[in-house]
Amino acid sequence: MKFKTIILSLILLCISSSLSAQVSLSKVDSVLKSLYRFDFEGANHQIEAIDSIANPSLFNFLKSHYYRWYMMPIHEQSDQIIERYQDYLSGVEDIKHEDLLKDLNYSEINSTLLKAEYHYNKGNYYRAFKYGNDIYEIVSDHLEQEPELSEIKFLSGLYHFYYHYYKEQKPAFFAFSWIFKEGDKDTGLKWLEEVAQEESFVQTEANIYLAHIYLRIEDEPEKARQYVEWLNAQYPNNLKFYELYIETHLALDDFSPELKLMINKLLSSDKVYFQKYGKAYEAVLYAKIEAEETDKIKAIERAKMFISSFGKANHLMSLLLFQQYLMTGEEDWKDYRVYEYKLTSID
């Protein structure tokens, strides 16, 4: 049970994003699109218009998503905000066992994933496993034949890919992999790519995951390009999507003027979270273009100092330290390496 809890929790951390509801479709679609557009005032206005007494599960489902996007990253917020987020999650009805055998409510599926993620981050592994096991029961029935519903195909595709990924990354844990159904990487990528082309609630999420996978795991930024550009075209004001767009183009040595505009928007954000990304990208871009070597190093050092003054940011530090390594040969960057991809590897 212990090993199953650990592995299932690891997989869930990668599939606990915004799998959306199939209830009140127009309302859910409208709110989620507002969140993706970073129109938080508009999204909250729509949510507050819902009768929370008559439709408590829908109200709490949308409110939890609002908090997860507006208070990004939610796990780094104050205890008061995290507790409020947990209250909204708790207000969404749990999956019932009989639901697994009939029509599924995707708000319940999504919220179950978020509950598993929440309890995992809090160290409550047993409760994380409890929620995760409900999702596994759903996914395990849709791994051999391609699911018809985009939402289930998305979830099953993620399971296929991340099963393979963690089996390679955590071989000691996967000595116990007989307790799970086998996942297939190629099937997972194929299904995700199909969902990314289909109009559904999870189309945006499929594009996010494919951009992340091809950039940071598969080390194929050229393949990531089409997904980050789709996200940017659909939601040009989403600062979070700038992260994947900028890093993909930096990895391709594509220094278009648009990168600088995006970096400036990150720097001018009122949230330190985005300012840190802006500082790091500004320094990396500067180090990659023509400039005096000493000036490049100074820019890297200033960005490192700014980022480190606001807590942990290993991914951003790895970007900065690797650029510094290219100029100085100092290998401190290896202590911060988070992803194996072009910006943070020496291959």
Image: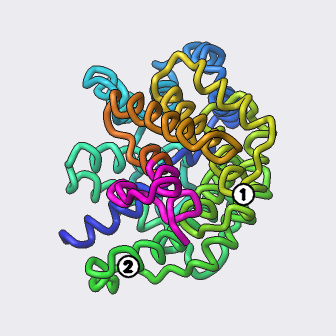
| Residue neighbourhood size for the residue with mark 1, other residues' Cα within 10 Å, grouped as few (<14), some (14–19), many (≥20) | some
Secondary-structure class at tag 2: loop
Q: Sequence order check: which comes first, mark 2 or mark 1?
A: 2
Q: Is residue 98 visible?
A: no
Q: Residue at x 39, y 57 (%)?
A: 330
Q: Indicate the quadrant where residue 172 lies.
A: bottom left
Instruction: Give yes or no for residue 14 being in the magenta stretch.
Output: no
Which contiguous range is marked in magenta? 321-347
Q: Amino acid at mark 1?
A: Leu
Secondary-structure class at tag 1: loop
Query: Residue 274 location in percent, x, y?
Result: 53, 29
Q: Nearer the viewer, mark 2 or mark 1?
A: 1
Using the image, determine if residue 270 lies above or below residue 289.
above
- Reading the image, the residue beneath label 1 is 252
Q: Residue at x 55, y 60 (%)?
A: 216
Using the image, determine if residue 74 lies above or below residue 173.
above
Q: Are marks 2 and 1 in contact (CB under 8 Å)?
A: no
- Reading the image, the residue beneath label 2 is 180
Q: Amino acid at mark 2?
A: Phe
Query: Residue 122 location in percent, x, y?
Result: 23, 43
